[in-house]
Amino acid sequence: MQELVKYLNYLEVPVQVEDYSTRYPELGSLKQKDYKVSTDGFGGLADIDKLRHINITFYCEGAGVLEYVVRGKTDIEREISFLHFKRLTSKTLRIPGHKKHDALKFLVDRKIPVRLRFEVDYENSLIKVIINNYSQFSIFTELWKAEEIDHDFLDMVTRYLLRQDSEFIKPEMSDEARKALRKKLAAIKRSERRFL
């Protein structure tokens, strides 16, 4: 894993991430940066018998900030909660002429923290893979048998991190359901823009 992270950090051309989010299409093109590997502190990589988890973290980052307005107390609270849950750095500004809970301007850094976590389940001989914020601010979880963790598995992880292969973890949503959901989200976004 450490070799993989070193390789990713020294790529001459950073991995480009296009269309990261349908929720915030204004994020634009992002680049993957600042790869790190860490362990749980229960012996870490030095004592493989005590290892509980390995984290690979990085950022999908772009220049500047994303600015948008949210209206209505409930929507504002949801937005603040979402940004906090996804660990996005943001600020809010009051809009002149509006009450505090009526409308807020959000300034969100174009820096999305991404984490791949490999947890060891010794009792069941399983590896649980958890991926946060890889795309669409999603969370994916999948279980792998310990004997499936080999060079082919690591190659698959590498291709996934380089965004060359999306087969590592597949969402359990059909293409038709995804298209319908995107249509609904686009309609919601259009109606929100009318209020701006």
Image: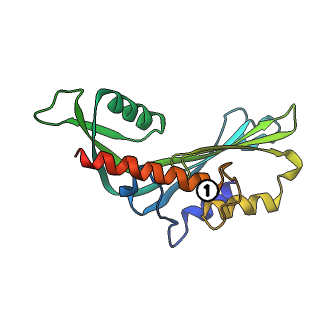
Choose between 32 and 143: the one closer to the eye: 143
Q: Secondary structure at mark 1?
A: helix
Residue drawn at 86 percent across, 45 percent down: 146
x, y percent for residue 124: 87, 34
Quadrant occupied by the N terminus: bottom right
Choose between 90 and 20: the one closer to the eye: 20
Residue 132 position by quadrant: top right
x, y percent for residue 112: 45, 49
Choose between 38 and 116: the one closer to the eye: 116
Residue 175 position by quadrant: bottom right
Disc 1: which residue: 176
Q: Amino acid at mark 1?
A: Glu
Q: Is residue 69 left or right of residue 82?
A: left
Please say if 154 is above or below 133.
below
Residue furthest left in the image: 97
x, y percent for residue 38: 62, 44
Q: Is residue 86 visible?
A: yes
Q: Is residue 115 left or right of residue 127?
A: left
x, y percent for residue 118: 71, 43
Identify the image's colour scheme: rainbow, by chain, secondary structure or one colour.
Answer: rainbow
